[in-house]
């Protein structure tokens, strides 16, 4: 039960933090600008972003194919990157009259885009739990999933509030520095995600991109620590902020009161550090507990004969996920999966995808699930490119065997480096 709880708690916490922390720091900055128009734009964008993310989820669930997750999040990421760049330029130039419109529109674009990406991902967690329960909504398993989502989201909100209060205790110069670090961390994640999409769509090909991105993709779950490091900058900057200077017009009592206020503000920084400790513990030890007992179908070793890797159809015709591993001439263990989709149609692909890398797939409740992002595959689409689907490979059915060309597996060995 605890494992099921963590499987929902951790992604809800991480998506909630990635959404809430930059928005909180941005709000602190906008509150200090002389014009009210920025704060109004922020509040309006929060409402639009929230309800748009709910609407998109509803459309996706209701129509299944009307909303492409990959295209939606890719577009939202591009808009966010442009908006974040404009905000940084405007803030470091100063809130002048001639930048008010670009800043206003950029704030709106960034807030809505972050909701359409991270808000969308956040709402997918409980929606996926409801769909997979298939009417069995009174089971302990379903209850643990919903509680995991609720507490993960609540923890993200509390942590984001602590960061907001700690950032609010900074002077303007240090606040802008903290915001720049936070936005830079978000942009790193966003750029990596865009490169993955471009690779998946065939716009970026070749050995250079595969060698560059393979280590990043294979360890993409660790990218959340970029956000954690950026959050850590907030309390460090707060603690290093010099104590208020004693002005001649202050009497001793007034100055002591100012010092006490400064000390009180530092407590928000201590709260952020405590929250960060819980975040990192949950994302490391918690993730280990959440995933260690996940049932993975063992990969059966296969060898090539006459330039072909063959598997008897009797082995794979039961409709369950089967994993095979071929030892390439370059030393890599190339894994691929086979599943009967229906009739005589098979889904065959590498045990890796172009977005999540070689983390692999497992079977849960007769569904194929991506091990990294816990996305459920549509069996009918296995064997076709796009999204989190397994990278398709050539095969043919002949003489009661499913045959994969040896050259096809050798060609894809670099994915498993």
Image: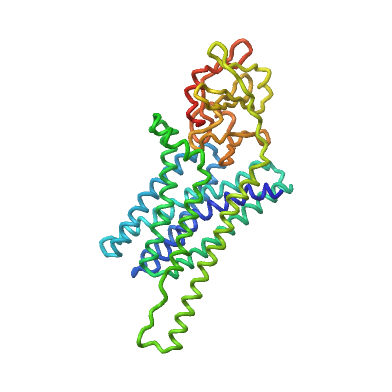
* 107 sits left or right of 274 in the view: left
Is 110 or 259 nearer to us in this picture?
A: 259
Whether residue 412 can be seen here: yes
Q: Residue at x 35, y 59 (%)?
A: 104
Q: Residue at x 48, y 32 (%)?
A: 386
Where residue 332 appears, as percent x and y from the top left, is 53, 27
Where residue 189 appears, as percent x and y from the top left, is 44, 47
**Scheme of image coloration:** rainbow
Is 180 or 91 nearer to us in this picture?
A: 180
Where residue 120 appears, as percent x and y from the top left, is 51, 48
Q: Is residue 230 above or below residue 200?
A: below
Is 252 or 84 nearer to us in this picture?
A: 252
Image quadrant assignment for residue 96: bottom left
- Residue furthest left as drawn: 98
Q: Is residue 191 above or below residue 337?
A: below
Q: Residue at x 46, y 80 (%)?
A: 259
Is 280 or 336 nearer to us in this picture?
A: 280
Q: Is residue 258 above or below residue 149?
A: below
Q: Residue at x 39, y 45 (%)?
A: 78
Image quadrant assignment for residue 169: bottom left
Number of marks in the rendered image? 0
Where residue 144 appears, as percent x and y from the top left, is 69, 50
* 289 sits left or right of 352 in the view: right
Whether residue 341 can be seen here: no
- Residue furthest right as drawn: 139
* 121 sits left or right of 112 in the view: right
């Amino acid at each position: 039960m605890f494992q099921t709880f963590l499987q929902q708690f951790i992604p809800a916490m991480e998506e909630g933090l990635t959404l809430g922390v930059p928005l909180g720091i941005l709000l602190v900055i906008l509150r200090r600008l002389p014009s009210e128009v920025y704060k109004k734009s922020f509040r309006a964008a929060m409402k639009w972003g929230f309800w748009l993310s709910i609407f998109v989820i509803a459309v996706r669930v209701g129509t299944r194919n009307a909303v492409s997750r990959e295209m939606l999040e890719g577009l939202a990421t591009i808009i966010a990157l442009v908006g974040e760049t404009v905000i940084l330029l405007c803030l470091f130039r100063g809130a002048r009259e001639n930048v008010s419109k670009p800043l206003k529109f950029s704030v709106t674009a960034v807030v809505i885009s972050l909701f359409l990406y991270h808000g969308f991902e956040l709402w997918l967690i409980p929606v996926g739990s409801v769909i997979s329960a298939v009417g069995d909504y009174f089971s302990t398993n379903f209850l643990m999933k919903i509680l995991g989502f609720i507490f993960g989201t609540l923890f993200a909100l509390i942590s984001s509030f602590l960061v907001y209060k700690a950032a609010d205790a900074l002077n303007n110069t240090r606040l802008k520095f903290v915001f720049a670090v936070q936005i830079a961390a978000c942009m790193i994640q966003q750029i990596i995600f865009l490169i993955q999409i471009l690779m998946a769509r065939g716009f970026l090909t070749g050995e250079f991109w595969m060698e560059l991105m393979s280590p990043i993709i294979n360890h993409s779950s660790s990218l959340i620590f970029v956000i954690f490091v950026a959050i850590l900058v907030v309390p460090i900057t707060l603690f290093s902020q010099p104590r208020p200077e004693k002005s001649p017009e202050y009497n001793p009592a007034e100055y002591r009161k100012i010092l006490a206020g400064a000390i009180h503000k530092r407590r928000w920084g201590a709260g952020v550090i405590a929250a960060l400790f819980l975040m990192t513990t949950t994302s490391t030890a918690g993730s280990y507990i959440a995933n260690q007992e996940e049932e993975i179908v063992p990969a059966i070793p296969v060898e090539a004969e006459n330039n072909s890797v063959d598997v008897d159809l009797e082995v794979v015709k039961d409709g369950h996920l089967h994993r095979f591993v071929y030892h390439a001439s370059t030393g890599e263990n190339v894994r691929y999966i086979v599943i009967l989709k229906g009739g005589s149609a098979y889904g065959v692909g590498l045990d890796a995808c172009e977005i999540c890398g070689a983390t692999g797939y497992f079977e849960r409740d007769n569904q194929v699930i991506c091990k990294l992002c816990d996305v459920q595959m549509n069996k009918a689409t296995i064997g076709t490119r796009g999204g989190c689907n397994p990278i398709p490979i050539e095969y043919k059915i002949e003489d009661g065997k499913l045959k994969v060309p040896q050259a096809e597996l050798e060609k894809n060995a670099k994915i498993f480096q």
